[in-house]
Image: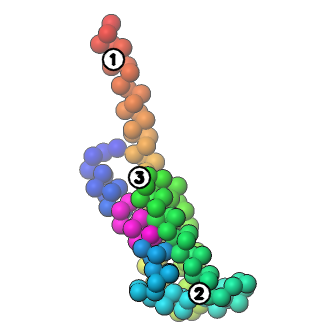
């Protein structure tokens, strides 16, 4: 991968991974927001648990996705995060409230898609570099 893209990759990886992880942790302590208030009434009526319990489950998923992105499963984590953020945005739109947050979540989903694609390109470039290395050694030995 072009070395000029490395800072972009790392910025997205650290920023999105940390945001997902911290938002997930905050579902248990509530310092950033009153998370159950963000749950769409349509979804709240359809689930068999309280909004608070549901948000704890959401928190666990967000922690896991954040850790995946941060720990190196960046491609898969990026795609999962993208889908997760779109789902959150849809939930917010169906609630009729927090539309500004829904727009931000869609923008973050686009960033997560970019991270996943950059991860693919980065992995392909690393694989191509590994494939070229043995050929150089064989040519030098001959």
Q: Position of residue 25 (x, y in %)?
A: 46, 75
Q: Is residue 101 above or below residue 139?
A: below
Q: Which residues are magenta?
A: 13-21
Type of secondary structure dominating the magenta stretch: helix
Neighbours of disc 2 within 10 Å: few (<14), some (14-19), many (20+): some
Q: Quadrant of the C terminus?
A: top left
Residue at 39% x, 30% y: name it: 130
Q: Which mark is residue 137?
A: 1
Neighbours of disc 1 within 10 Å: few (<14), some (14-19), many (20+): few
Question: Residue 113: in sight, yes or no?
Answer: no
Residue at 41% x, 52% y: name it: 118
Nearest to N terminus: mark 1 or mark 2: 2
Q: Secondary structure at mark 2?
A: helix
Residue ID for mark 3: 118
Q: Is residue 67 left or right of residue 51?
A: left
Q: Is residue 86 left or right of residue 16?
A: right
Residue ID for mark 2: 52
Q: Quadrant of residue 69?
A: bottom left
Q: Secondary structure at mark 3?
A: helix
């Amino acid at each position: 991968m072009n070395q000029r893209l490395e800072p972009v990759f790392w910025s997205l990886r650290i920023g999105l991974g940390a945001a997902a992880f911290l938002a997930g942790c905050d579902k248990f302590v509530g310092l950033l927001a009153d998370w159950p208030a963000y749950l769409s009434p349509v979804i709240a009526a359809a689930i068999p648990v309280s909004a608070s319990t549901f948000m704890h489950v959401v928190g666990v998923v967000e922690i896991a996705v954040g850790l995946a992105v941060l720990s190196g499963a960046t491609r898969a984590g990026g795609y999962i995060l993208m889908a997760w953020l779109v789902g959150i945005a849809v939930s917010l739109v169906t609630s009729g409230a927090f539309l500004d947050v829904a727009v931000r979540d869609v923008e973050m989903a686009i960033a997560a898609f970019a991270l996943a694609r950059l991860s693919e390109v980065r992995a392909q470039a690393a694989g191509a570099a590994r494939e070229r290395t043995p050929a150089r050694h064989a040519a030098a030995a001959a």
